Amino acid sequence: MKLAVMLGMVIATAIAQVAAAAEPATAIVVQDSTSLRAAAKDSAQQQAVLWQGDALEVRGRRLDYLQVYDHRRERAGFVRAAQVRVLSLQPQDAPELLAVVRFLRDTSGAEALGIGYAAAYLKAVPASAIGAEPFDALGTMADRLARRASTNRNKANETVIAAHLEVVAAYGMNIRSFEHDGRMQLCYDGEAFRRVLALKSSDEEKARAALGLTRQECIDPAITPVERARFDTWRAEVLDRAPRANLPEYLKNRLRMRSAAVWASIAFERTRHGDSAQEAASLAVQELTAVNKLELTDEDQVAYSDAALRVGASRWGAEPAQPTPSAGLAIATSPGQPGETCIKLLDRKRDLAHPLLQRCTFGTVWANSAKSNPYGTALALAVQPLESWREMWLFHLTGDGWRIDVVPPGDDAPDPSLSLGYVEFAGWVPGARKMLAAREVRSAGKFTRSFEVLDLDTLAVHKRVDNPQALSLFYRWQDPAWKGQTVSLR
């Protein structure tokens, strides 16, 4: 009996070895613009151009060429052996493939090659031994390739990047494209990152996956408001699942900044549904405040400014309601048409039926932001028409009576839907018809922060500085409540 068992094991091993030997070898292209030729010589006709990461079936060898078949293009031919690497997909060779994946994971420009090696590793390794690491690498490389394709400004690189995108698509990496901020935005759909969160993974892998799945620029502009609200809630849950205790400080900062931006969006969305925004807006402010500015990388400075502008636009949601003043100007709000809010300007002599002025808006009216000057001739109010765009409405008395002027965050912002920013009341200047304002805006990819003295009659900027300490009027007359609440002084 024992002899029969041993004989059976030997036969099974032999059959497995024969099957392995009979399985076609796989080669992966390691050089861009590799020629697939009709014969094993340089002068032979070129059948196709191959790129890093292309997988080929090896069918033979002639001189210093390999005879291969390209299943993606359905072409046979010859490639130089030095331009490809023949891979063993046996389980015992999987660690070597993973070592190459680790080397290529953070190598910019080698994403397609790295994804090819990761695919080979997943084919070679036993299913029971698959962990989160290869999916972390796949997501990281696909995400970086999509970002490179979106930000590429070099015409010479366009062909290479387009070819690499085709290569990774053949491995099942889905990279979506849509118009965003007036240009084409490419984004990885995040399937590998979802697998990282589903598998047993390290805290850093979970953090990278959460960041990869929640990128602000990868939100489809065509998404409906209801879908966007659900998606932002999901993004907040994903970020909350990423443990922070054992992460390096720069990764903690990235999670904080992303969470701040997401909660700021949720705060705005909740007000649109008539719900309280205080919890969401408070979380946004807390996350932004928790950012360790001493541990921000150069790359993270832009993300920090972006998060601050988004939080600044919705920060009034974190403030409690203000009681109606017994004297001076005040506002009252009431529903208008579906989705519309009507604002009425009142004083001691005017009631709701006879307001000084009335205007309706589809934006979010932050009634608790209303600030009247001591003379009862002007009132500033924050109105937020978009999740990342907050304006200041100025009700003021002129020679022709009461009027409303809208002060936008940016003087030359072409379209609020393509920019983000806020402008807010910062104080009244006694005696003169002037007020203080602070504004931050991103327009055409450039961030600008300024502190200004505005003329109440014309809204012209009388003086403008980038540091409030450099402007004596601003330093002397800034509103204490504004100073304690604003994110512009971060």
Image: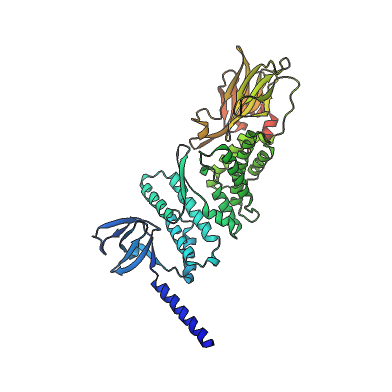
The scheme the figure's colours follow is rainbow
Q: Residue at x 73, y 17 (%)?
A: 348
Residue 342 place in picture, x, y as percent:
64, 23
Q: Residue at x 31, y 62 (%)?
A: 79
Q: Residue furthest top?
A: 400
User: Could you tell me which quadrant the C terminus lies in?
Assistant: top right
The answer, for residue 392, to whether it is visible in the render is yes
Residue 286 place in picture, x, y as percent:
67, 42
Q: Closer to the camera, 451 or 48?
A: 48
Q: Tell me: residue 481, above or below residue 246.
A: above
Residue 464 place in picture, x, y as percent:
56, 28
Residue 25 place in picture, x, y as percent:
38, 68
Q: Closer to the camera, 413 or 112?
A: 112
The answer, for residue 486, to whether it is visible in the render is no
Count of number-bearing discs: 0
Instruction: Tell me: 314 left or right of 8.
Output: right
Q: Closer to the camera, 152 or 57?
A: 57
Q: Residue furthest right?
A: 326
**Residue 49 placement: quadrant:** bottom left
**Residue 28 placement: quadrant:** bottom left
User: Could you tell me which quadrant the N terminus lies in?
Assistant: bottom right
Q: Tell me: residue 257, above or below residue 202.
A: above
Q: Tell me: residue 43, above or below residue 317.
A: below
Q: Closer to the camera, 444 or 366?
A: 366
Q: Tell me: residue 480, above or below residue 307.
A: above
Instruction: Tell me: 297 left or right of 377.
Output: left
